[in-house]
Amino acid sequence: MTTDPAQRVEELRAKIAYHNQLYHQQDLPEISDAEYDELVRELKRLELDHPDLVTPDSPSQQVGFTPSDLFTPVEHLTPMMSLDNATSFEELAAWGKRMERYIDSNVEYACELKMDGLALSLVYENGHLARAATRGDGRVGEDITLNVMQIQAVPHQLKTQEKLVEARGEIYMPVSSFKALNDEQLKQGERIFANPRNAAAGSLRQKDPQITASRNLSFFCYQLAAGPSDFTRHEQTLEYLREQGLPVNPTSKVLKSLEEVYEFCQFWQTNRHSNDYEIDGVVVKVNDLAQRMELGFTSKAPRWAVAFKFPPEERNTLLKDIMVSIGRSGKATPFAVLEPVFVGGSTVKLATLHNQDQVALKDVRPGDTVIVRKAGDVIPEVVGPVLSRRPEGLPAWEFPKVCPECGADLARSEGESDTYCTSAECPKQLEQRIVHFASRGCMDIENLGERTVQLFLQLELLRDIGGIYTLDYDKVRAIEGFGEISVTNLKTGIEASKQRPLSNLLSGLGIRHLGATGARVLAKGMNHLDNILKASADEIAAVEGIGTVIAHSVHEFFQQEDNRELIERLRQAGVNFEGPKASTLPQNLAGMSIVVTGSLENFSREGAEEAIKERGGKSPGSVSKKTNAVVLGDGPGAAKITKARELKIPILNEAQFQQLLETGQLPGDGESAVVG
Ligand code: IVH
């Protein structure tokens, strides 16, 4: 990279122009928004330090892009400007300070979600939708009226007959529609979209309006750009737009200090995935329209607004390698080895690529620059390659033919998407089966994690699952790093595991198709492991809630000689085989659905859910209209609380939960349950 500012400025301008073209005209960006913003920031910094280098055609002086020739150009009634950004409280405060140069009275801030979509201008003449246009270069946009008319959220007719109304807002694709669209594209073998924003752009900028019609696009309005002028505050203009039948986002708030504004930004940063649309920040606007007039504009953006941008959830990084991991069933899962990258709040080094077809569809190759996405608590994902950065002649990745752990053949059955190691003796499968048996939700053996299992296998202290209960503690004691305390802890953990519920044991055995819920149903329905051992597949299928696929799989598992042997060894060791006793507790939560989020003082999450179920209630993992209450512990899931508030579902603390368990009654009106 050059150190000559003039040369660097030129370089940056060329790069920005190139990426502008890809982003806006081809809807095929090669770099993440964060990287693009960084290029613009660097250019602005240089231009600030070297004002002589500023030219009128610099991208720093322009908004957006030049319209493509796919649609007719239209000149906007007033320019569609962009916004300055802030990414911290300091930058927000600096914006506030700059405003003080122009106004000295108190400011109210109208805060709105920054929709991650495409800016749209809607012009209504005498109440009729006359024209819809993209932002374009801010002065001239593209006429996409016919396409926009296909979007249900955009009214063709307003309530008013007003001569001219211009509403501006954002077109977006709901996240659920984006996922469904990509699933469909995958099925059809068509290109998949990197994110909802690109999908929205790709769906809108179509010559054939029927394609737009077939994609579920939506719209939120955020600005009255022309129309009646008898309003004094921004919030009134939004209310007017709403009254006219235009959709306005309901989360907007007017706040009186930048501290409160920052809190609002932080709240939405934490809860950014709690809505069915993507947001990439908060737009903060001066509420008072007269104050806005005083503040005016710079050449590019209004002084009366700023975009508080959230940290990026997508980043580019190098795909160093694609490797394959072997699971307890022998499943061979390809995963990406990445140059570590900080994205979505954590450093990502590895990401699953799921299966052979996914790698082929995404066409990611070791040596590619790839887009990595980590959104909220969702697992990190490789979105796709940046094709323009692919080194010439980079070979496609091929799925290995043999197991990287044991050298046996890997095989994929006709019609299946997964590939399996064919060896029954594969050491990795054995290791993973033991790790799974000891894991949380199964026998939950503290101090017997993956590392320890690997070590014990290596030292031949452990040969199979049954060996856990005949471990030679003298030999463990002799291992370097295993003090008396760790040996005692391990022993205590193993002893305690003998008392786990039958359902945990069933889960731990790793029977194909039998998940945690199925295991619970089976344990309750059959009452004792010996009953399951004796049962035919049909008898197992007779248990309510157990389907034939699970029943056959369970039956087959217990028919196998080595599995029967394992069960006998577990019996010898004194592992609990008994199912849950019929509950003697009053069924006072029958018909109720109670969601638990976060950890409580006197219950583990599972314990709390169990307590609900023992009293006849249900405890699903997510909040819906059917939820009667949400129990709130420490470190709760943000999405659950937001949803509960939205649906006005009572939120209970631990004491109120205890009371509910005892009485079956929710705290009534006037008591301290937090609602909405
Ligand atoms: S106000 C003159 N409000 O963010 C300023 N913009 O860089 C008009 N955006 O492309 C913009 N949500 O399309 C405003 N609630 C909101 C917004 C919003 C998303 C987009 C807008 C523009 C970009 C600003």
Image: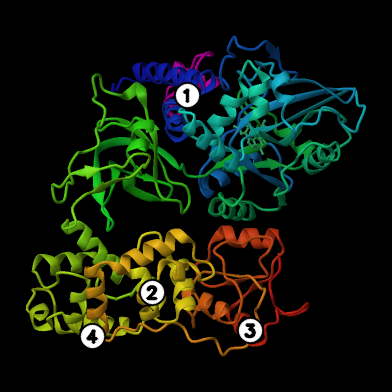
Q: Main secondary structure of the magenta part?
A: helix
Q: Relative to residue 113, is residue 33 depicted above or below?
A: above
Q: Amino acid at mark 2?
A: Asn
Estimate the spatial distance between the alpha carbons at disc 3 and disc 4, rounded to whole Å. Answer: 36 Å
* Residue assigned mark 3: 587
Q: Horizontal and vertical percent for residue 277?
A: 61, 43
Q: Which mark is residue 55?
A: none
* Residue assigned mark 4: 572
**Quadrant of the image where one finds ligand 1:** top right
Q: Earlier in the sequence, mark 3 or mark 2?
A: 2
Residue 326 falls left or right of residue 30? left
Q: Secondary structure at mark 3?
A: loop
Q: Horizontal and vertical percent for residue 350?
A: 30, 47
Magenta stretch: includes residue 50? yes
* Residue assigned mark 2: 504
Estimate the spatial distance between the alpha carbons at disc 4 and disc 1, rounded to whole Å. Answer: 63 Å
In the image, the segment drawn in magenta is 44-61
Q: Earlier in the sequence, mark 4 or mark 2?
A: 2
* Residue assigned mark 1: 28
- Nearer the observer: mark 1 or 2; the answer is 2
